[in-house]
Image (cartoon, grey):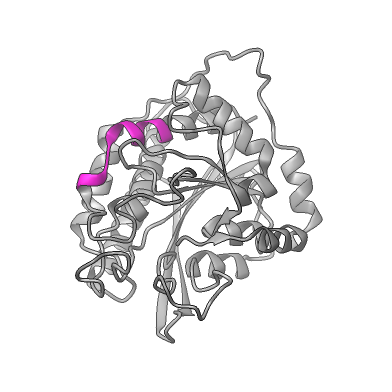
């Protein structure tokens, strides 16, 4: 990740989306700006979310085919099952930009499976197999504490607090941890201009949905949501597919006091991330909460470098994202 897509490619993506996806996007509920009433919901424990990130990083770089990768997927499956979520690991195969055949393991956890009114929460759990933006050790895998583990940590804590609370959301929830998101071609290579070498796990998932899969009304992707003083602009592809949801989430963030993170500026163009394929192939109108500085045009000084380690993670940022996502879920009817 993360290529900034041109406006032409965004137009292609939008035109390629099925009409029913657009209709679902139009139906996304928007909270009236004149009234903001508190609601009952479980408390997001940021210390717990942080521990889940520490534990992921502790396995080592979670690159497909490694022992760390295997340990991590076993850990995810065990945790979600412990919280009584219906949990499966989707196994698949894909080919990387350099022709390597890899096994994909997408972790899928579902709550209230009989409820056909559903929402989708997503993050990727793999880490970058090389530090192509670093000055040294460029061929070695990175920890991916922010780029990968942070979004997963937030979603794990959301799953835990919901399962342990007497206050339940009115919607069913699907959580998907996508594999092989960060195996895209290194910076500077010109072979791929489409972004198709990225997000291999979400591409596989979107292309292999069962006929009886109940599509959620929308999806929220979390990516790089744990760094100190992170900013989350209104990302371009998200605004193309589901501007109503973007505006709703950013409105809630502002009302909860997290406007310094969820800034009103837009990221021009769009960002190649898992939500692109969830939108384009699965036809689920989805948005991306992603750290990106629209003024500097970058994902942070640690992006795809070895400095993306546990020291990058800031609990205040994790708390902001976790509370905003919980607020969004519990306001659904």
Image location (x, y in percent) of residue 86: 46, 52
Q: Nearer the viewer, residue 90 or 280?
A: 280
Q: Main secondary structure of the magenta part?
A: helix
Q: Residue at x 32, y 50 (%)?
A: 146
Q: Residue at x 25, y 75 (%)?
A: 139
Image location (x, y in percent) of residue 256: 47, 21
Tell me which corner region of the image, top left, top right, bottom left or bottom right, holds residue 88. Answer: bottom left
Q: Residue at x 63, y 37 (%)?
A: 245
Tell me which corner region of the image, top left, top right, bottom left or bottom right, holds residue 18. Answer: bottom right
User: Residue 141 vs residue 94: left or right?
Assistant: left
**Residue segment shown in magenta:** 311-321
Farthest-out residue, front: 296
Image location (x, y in percent) of residue 47: 25, 34
User: Residue 173 vs residue 18: left or right?
Assistant: left
Tell me which corner region of the image, top left, top right, bottom left or bottom right, holds residue 136. Answer: bottom left
Number of labels in the image equals 0
Was residue 312 drawn as part of the magenta stretch in this picture?
A: yes
């Amino acid at each position: 990740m993360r290529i900034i897509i041109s406006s032409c490619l965004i137009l292609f993506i939008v035109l390629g989306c099925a009409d029913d996806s657009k209709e679902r996007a139009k139906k996304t509920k928007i909270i009236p700006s004149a009234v903001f009433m508190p609601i009952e919901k479980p408390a997001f424990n940021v210390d717990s979310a942080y521990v889940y990130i520490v534990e992921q990083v502790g396995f080592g770089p979670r690159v497909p085919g490694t022992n760390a990768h295997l340990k991590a997927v076993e850990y995810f499956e065990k945790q979600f099952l412990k919280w009584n979520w219906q949990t499966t690991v989707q196994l698949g195969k894909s080919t990387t930009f350099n022709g390597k055949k890899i096994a994909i393991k997408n972790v899928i956890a579902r709550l209230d499976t009989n409820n056909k009114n559903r929402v989708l929460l997503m993050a990727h759990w793999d880490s970058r197999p090389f530090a192509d933006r670093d000055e040294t050790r460029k061929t070695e895998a990175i920890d991916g504490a922010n780029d990968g583990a942070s979004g997963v940590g937030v979603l794990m804590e959301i799953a835990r607090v919901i399962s342990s609370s007497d206050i339940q959301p009115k919607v069913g929830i699907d959580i998907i941890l996508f594999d092989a998101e960060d195996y895209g071609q290194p910076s500077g290579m010109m072979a791929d201009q489409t972004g198709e070498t990225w997000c291999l796990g979400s591409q596989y998932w979107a292309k292999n949905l069962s006929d009886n899969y109940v599509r959620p009304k929308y999806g929220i992707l979390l990516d790089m949501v744990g760094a100190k003083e992170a900013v989350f602009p209104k990302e371009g592809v998200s605004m193309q597919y589901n501007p109503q949801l973007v505006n709703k989430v950013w409105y809630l963030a502002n009302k909860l006091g997290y406007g310094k993170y969820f800034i009103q500026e837009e990221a021009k163009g769009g960002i190649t991330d898992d939500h692109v394929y969830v939108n384009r192939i699965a036809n689920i109108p989805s948005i991306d909460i992603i750290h990106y500085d629209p003024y500097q045009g970058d994902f942070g000084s640690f992006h795809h470098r070895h400095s993306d380690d546990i020291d990058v993670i800031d609990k205040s940022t994790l708390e902001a994202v976790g509370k905003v996502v919980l607020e969004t879920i519990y306001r659904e009817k």
